[in-house]
Image (spheres, helix red, strand yellow):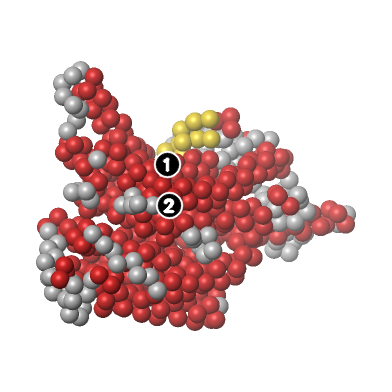
Amino acid sequence: MSEALLTWVVFLPLASVVGLALLHGSLVAFGLSRGLPDVLWRWLALAATVVTFGMSVALAAGYDATDTAFQFVAHRPWLPRWGIHYFVGLDGVGLAMLLLTTFLVPLVLIGSWTGYSRRKGYLMHVLVLETGALGAFASLNLFQFYVFFEALLVPMVFLIGVFGGPLRVRAAIKFFLFTLAGSVLFLVALLVLAVLQQQQFGGVNFDLVAVSGIPLPPILETRVPTVQAPWWQQQTWLFAACALAFAVKIPLVPLHTWLPDAHVEAPTGGSVLLAGVLLKLGAFGFVRVALPLFPVAAQQFAPVLAVVALVGILYGALLAMVQSDLKKLVAYTSISHLGFVVLGLFALNVEGLQGGILQMVNHGLSTGALFLLVGMIAERRDTREIAAFGGVAKPMPVFALFLVLITMSSIGVPMLNGFVGEFLVLLGAFERSAAVGAAATVGVVLAAIVMLSMLRRVLFGPVENPENRGLIDLDRRERAVLVAFVIPIVWIGVHPATLLRRVEPSILELLRVMDVRARASAAESEASASESSGSEAPEADGSSATVPGAAGQRARWLAAATAPAGRPEPAR
């Protein structure tokens, strides 16, 4: 059951779409009605997302936080000749992203209950997007990860291009071209890794970790050279290809220009999913793929990416200051917050990585809720211009309460979720570089100035615009959605150990794997230099020995494969 449960979580939304479409088509074909009524589409789609969230909570309840191995593993042959398998499993990082995704999707449907949720196409694309995201976060086969990574583009393009604003087609095309260009680089890196593995082991296996019964080592055992190899096979270039692909997805400055347009033109639910789910795939790709596969290059690029992240933090905050559109202001603050995520990841220490991953969750909650609030008030006023508001707290006190609370979480006020994540990121950044940490602290201050200024201009002061006097406050459905956001926002702020104790073992294991592979790369380089000079290669610990060749490693894996096959036991 534990193996099947994760598969059900991943594919239940997609299965629901197929089932609803077949039921609708059958009713039309037999002439029983015009098809499944819209209200049933909405309720059944919502039920599928709620059940998916319930199953993900069951996974979290059964997750062993002390185990560094992947859990809830399912492994089945798909295209075994090419090393492509259906392979899913969770560590602490994947579990956090899975919970965030399954939590956000039903809230998106409830939040847009009177809007686009009435349309079947909108519901179908949201559910397909959920399966794509869950599949990417759970994938342990690199090719499978790439498939889910790319599959997300299609429903998001339709959500923006069909259900978005006046410039929706332009924004959808721009989003598609930017992300597709980055994904092509990722595909090139994946193919080069396959070539390297074929050269070293005589076959290809895209599994990220070992599974009993597979005669080839996982892709993580592939030796990616740092020197003395064709330039396109070296860690520097492969890491750069992956980094660009993930940087577009996050996005990092200067690859961010598609994001404000996409957010502004997307429907409210699309903006929540874009901020809460899709943007996390880039950061998750660094953790799952780029850091463990290319640890030497990651260390080399860490200062560069830290500076790029710092530029994004400051640049996003400064651009947000001059925005007149409320939704675009939130979009630019999103760029600033995602800079903190990357800064934490490339501190390459426990505190920074913990903070970066926690900020991924925090950003999805706080920014997702902000986009919902912007959508609620824009629906009532038919405008998002900040100048059109002022004094909104008088006719809409409940709206004002939620906007203030969620804004406080976004700028990192103590006892709310944003504070813990930013504190850990800054702690990791200061440990890595005091100058970068100090500059990032300036970004925290700028973000606070931007958001507090927004609150003043929207909520407080006299009600000068007569149209604002008759605004209707939030109804029970809208209040319920926002309360659902506030609960984890406060809980993480008060008790962050709920997430951190599940994430920390995975981070420690990631750093251990990076260290082992970096030492192996150093030994490989020394061996190559010794071979060229005709001397014996010292091991990484200084003793005299030769580094095992590809034939020896393949023999070891073939011997392991002859062991009795049983339940897959992935080893990190």
Q: Secondary structure at mark 2?
A: helix
Which mark, by number, is residue 471?
A: none
Q: Left or right? Give the position of 551 relative to 97.
A: right
Q: Is residue 294 above or below residue 34?
A: below
Image-quadrant location for residue 473 = bottom left
- To which residue does mark 2 refer? 171
C-alpha distance separating marks 2 and 1: 14 Å
Residue situated in front as seen by the camera: 200 or 493 = 493
Residue at the spot x=31%, y=78% of the render? 453
Identify the mark nearer the N-term, 2 or 1.
1
Say which quadrant the N terminus sits in. top left
Q: Can you give x and y, in whole percent of width and height, for residue 45 in the image?
A: 24, 40
Residue at the far top: name it: 30
Within 10 Å of the Cα at label 2, are there few (<14), some (14-19), or many (20+) other Cα atoms? many
Point out residue 506 in the picture as x, y percentages from the top left corner: 45, 58
Residue 250's place in the image compared with 53, above or below, is below
